[in-house]
Image (cartoon, rainbow, N blue to C red):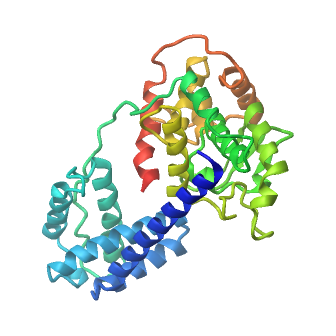
Amino acid sequence: MKADEQKRVVRHRKRKLRKKRSEAIQSVETVDNALMIYVRLYVDWSQATGRTEATVRGRAVRLERFVQWCDVRGLNQPEEITRAVLEAYQRHLYLYRKKDGKPLSIRSQESMLAPLRGFCRWLARERYVQYNAASELVLPRAPKLLPRVVLSVTQVERLMAQPDVSELTGARDRAMLEVLYSTGMRRMELMNLTLSDIDLEGRTVMVRQGKGRRDRYIPMGERACYWVERYLDEIRSMLIVRQEDWTLFLTDYGEPYSGNRLTDFVKRYMELAGIRDGACHALRHACATHMLENGADVRFIQALLGHADLSSTQIYTQVAIGKLKEIHAATHPARLARTHDDDAAASLLAAIDAEADEDAQ
């Protein structure tokens, strides 16, 4: 796909996304329901108590949908939210069908109900209601499934070859793919990287305020560093609009990437590489799988990926950056040829896959 055609596709997707967001905002603003006052107070409280921007935004969107559902049924006061009402809403989510006729996934249902449980707890604590109606609400539990997409080393290398590095943004696209694969970082973490987070000489990257508001200092492979350096030397200065913007990776419009745009970007290259499913999280899976297959200890992968708790039987171990760099260099296939195949990654990959739906929301 030529650069001009790519830009046209990006502009078209951008217009569709803006229209969708505008319609969503307008639909929320038309809800004249007293419950919205309490939702906004709860959202403000969430922000004031240090929740991440993504968490605050997610709570607001999901609670606004609940208020819309309540409004249709004539419910507009906190004391009208009873256990029976919450269970009726839970049944509504279970029976709901999307435009394609498919039901909401268990994880999606859980993500819609979890903020509601927190909201009810807050209402009771602030004495807006006499009791917490959600105290006995049982959330649906998603089964621990094996990863939907596990790329082979060959597939990853084919993916890396897709960006046309002779064009303006090709080096940028290659750099972003390489960083995702080399570090195993989450989509949001890549979006939030700044110039000061990258140490090319030391081949490390600081992931700030990752999931759970935890910072981590992790290695970045030699090949990823090469492409990031090339992007910085040749491309970024041509994309930047505001000189004070320190965001590392910028779009064709000189803006930071949104989550949806980053997902579309990776999906497009995967399709070109003949890979049917997957996006950013598929590269996170691949990073963990390939390093485990090459002998990396699960604790080092846990530290690399920023998992505070891998499972109920595995406790987080803080790993020194020097040792982590040594393990990374010895086991990451971007530097080392694959040596053997086994299923040692299964439990770790299940934990990574559990994040995928959450990141996509």
Apparent side of residue 133 relative to residue 192 in the rendered image (left or right) = left
Q: Position of residue 59 (x, y in %)?
A: 40, 67
138 w.r.t. 285: above or below: below
Residue nearest the viewer, comparing 48 with 230: 230
Q: How many marks?
A: 0
Apparent side of residue 164 relative to residue 97 in the rendered image (left or right) = right
Q: Position of residue 277 (x, y in %)?
A: 42, 37
Determine if residue 313 is in view: no
Apparent side of residue 254 relative to residue 290 in the rendered image (left or right) = right
Q: Residue at x 20, y 52 (%)?
A: 101
Q: Residue at x 61, y 22 (%)?
A: 296
88 w.r.t. 194: above or below: below
102 w.r.t. 133: above or below: above
Q: Position of residue 342 (x, y in %)?
A: 48, 14
Q: Residue at x 77, y 47 (%)?
A: 231
Apparent side of residue 323 relative to residue 76 in the rendered image (left or right) = right
Q: For the C terminus, give its image quadrant.
A: bottom left
Q: Residue at x 69, y 27 (%)?
A: 328
Outermost residue toward the top? 340
Q: For the N terminus, give its image quadrant.
A: top right
72 w.r.t. 232: above or below: below
Q: Position of residue 41 (x, y in %)?
A: 42, 82
Residue nearest the viewer, comparing 88 with 250: 250
Residue nearest the viewer, comparing 303 with 94: 94
Residue nearest the viewer, comparing 99 with 165: 165
Determine if residue 111 is in view: yes
